[in-house]
Amino acid sequence: MFEEIYSPVQKIALHPFNNLFVKRDDLIDPYISGNKWRKLKYILAKAKAGHKTHLVTFGGAYSNHLVATAAAASRSGIKSTAFVRGEEVKNEMLLLCSLFGMRLIFTDRESYRNKHSLFEQHFANDDRAYFVDEGGASHEATLGCAEVIAELTETYDHIFCAAGTGTTAAGLLKGIRQQGLNTKLHVIPVLKGGSFIKDEIAKYTPLSDQLKLHQDYHFGGYAKTTPELIGFIKNFTAQTGLLSDPVYTAKMFYAIVDLQTQGVIDKDEKVLAIHTGGLMGLFGMKDKF
Ligand SMILES: *Cc1c(COP(=O)(O)O)cnc(C)c1O
């Protein structure tokens, strides 16, 4: 299922910028979207190599990672189970998970904290079960994300990505180093207090001054929005034809426009935004629009 992918780089017309490009990882797949596809690629390969036929993972009720894992598992002919944080709920995302055959185990927030002990409690006797951390965070995930950079046929002055755990950013930084590029990697944490992202990245790859962390674009924190961000999404989508979601990619696009407007990034420099997908998250926030 991971043989061929479609993720073109497209130039986007957003006045007054004339060197803005987007790597359309959101087009890879509607359900195994964007960076979740990148992250699962080598996780699945490792699971298969170890004769594991059951992915066990973790996430919140609106997790893109859960939908991606459920879809990837079913297409690979293996089982999936998710520990879902919080009390039992129904929503669009969990509906998709169920349709893809994922078993959902709703878990109170206290127990959810210790993922390894949950795995042990439920799956100690299942030698086909494979632990996949929340969001797919792992060394394997960074290998898949590094390939985004290897696919590029042109060079850019700046590459931007949104960060939740920082695993994707770590993979991109790895890729930039592997390709010997001078490109700066700008990372936009979508959570408040995103300085931990640097430590996360450092778990996978050495830090460098090519890495720029911008901590002021969280809009109140994870899954928080403001009327300003919602207004930005409406304008940006109408002007460019590109969808972004309020949890991740809209915060990144907002940062790009803001940093260029401030002159931190020159408008003649080439900028590549990684569209990490996650558009179904929009529907969970329809009341904000
Ligand atoms: C999960 C996700 C991210 C965050 O990726 P990390 O590797 O956890 O930093 C970014 N964008 C989208 C659309 C996502 O679904």
Image: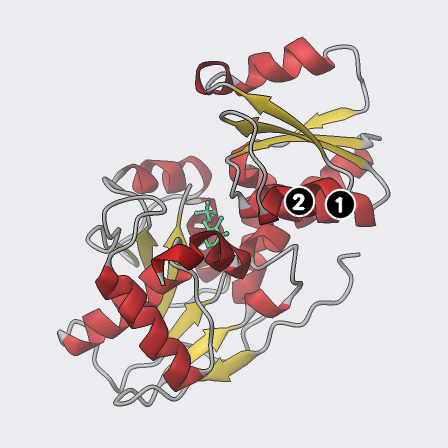
Q: Is residue 215 above or below residue 153?
A: above
Is residue 183 at least partly visible in the picture? Answer: no
Is residue 163 at least partly visible in the picture? Answer: yes
State the separation of the CA atoms marked 1 and 2: 6 Å
> Contact (CB < 8 A) between labels 1 and 2?
yes
Q: Is residue 12 left or right of residue 85?
A: left
SS class of the residue under badge 1? helix
- Viewer-proximal residue among 165 and 14: 14
Q: Is residue 77 above or below residue 21?
A: above
Q: Quadrant of the C terminus?
A: bottom left
Number of the label disc, if any, that sits on residue 99: 1
Q: Is residue 1 left or right of residue 207?
A: right
Say what amino acid the circle numbered 2 marks: Leu
Report which quarter residue 240 is drawn in.
bottom left
Residue 21: where, in percent of width, then height? 43, 80
Residue 50: where, in percent of width, then height? 80, 30
Q: Is residue 103 above or below residue 260?
A: above
Q: Residues within 10 Å of mark 2 (few under 14, many from 20)?
A: few
Mark 1: C-beta under 8 Å from nearest atom of ligand 1 = no
Q: Residues within 10 Å of mark 1 (few under 14, many from 20)?
A: few
Number of the label disc, if any, that sits on residue 95: 2
Q: Residue at x 75, y 45 (%)?
A: 99
Report which quarter residue 205 is drawn in.
top left
Say what amino acid the circle numbered 1 marks: Leu
Report which quarter residue 130 is drawn in.
top right
Residue 278: where, in percent of width, then height? 52, 57
Q: Residue at x 61, y 72 (%)?
A: 7
Residue 74: where, in percent of width, then height? 80, 45
SS class of the residue under badge 2? helix
